[in-house]
């Protein structure tokens, strides 16, 4: 919930930048987890959810702009 409030306050460019960072971090975690198990595998799940939150906020703004 806290993350959603922060996303609403950011500009679209900042959300896109955050999305790129989250995707890069997600790929890095997946690769490192495949080689040797990471300490907290729940971070992969959290990262995936953060990506979805960013995409949802971007889509919401896109739809609001069409009205």
Image (cartoon, grey):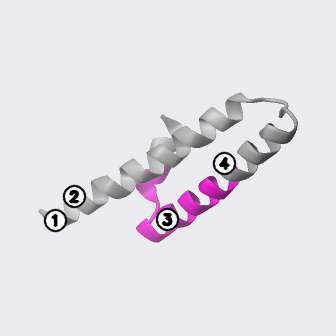
Whether residue 39 appears in magenta in the rendering, the answer is no
Q: Say what secondary structure mark 2 lies in.
A: helix
Q: Which residue is mark 1?
A: 66
Q: Contact (CB < 8 A) between labels 2 and 1?
A: yes
Callout 1 secondary element: helix
Circle 4 or circle 1, nearest the eye = 4
Work out how far the residue at label 2 is from the one at label 1, CA to CA, in angstroms. Answer: 5 Å
**Nearest to N terminus: mark 1 or mark 3:** 3
Q: Which residue is mark 4?
A: 26
Whole-percent x, y for residue 54 in the image: 46, 51
Q: Which mark is residue 63?
A: 2
Q: Say if residue 5 shows up in the picture.
A: no
Residue positioned most to the front: 35
Graded by Cα atoms within 10 Å as few (under 14), some (14 to 19) or many (20 or more), the crowding at tag 2 reads few
Q: Which residue is outermost to the right? A: 36
The residues tagged by marks 4 and 1 sit, at their Cα atoms, a distance apart of 31 Å
Magenta region: which residues?
5-26
At 61% across and 33% down in the image, what residue appears? 45
x and y, in percent, of residue 52 in the image: 46, 44
């Amino acid at each position: 919930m806290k993350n959603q409030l922060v996303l609403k306050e950011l500009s679209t460019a900042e959300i896109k930048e955050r999305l790129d960072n989250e995707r890069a971090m997600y790929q890095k975690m997946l690769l490192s987890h495949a080689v040797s198990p990471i300490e907290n595998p729940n971070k992969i799940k959290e990262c995936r959810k953060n990506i979805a939150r960013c995409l949802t906020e971007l889509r919401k703004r896109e739809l609001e702009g069409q009205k």
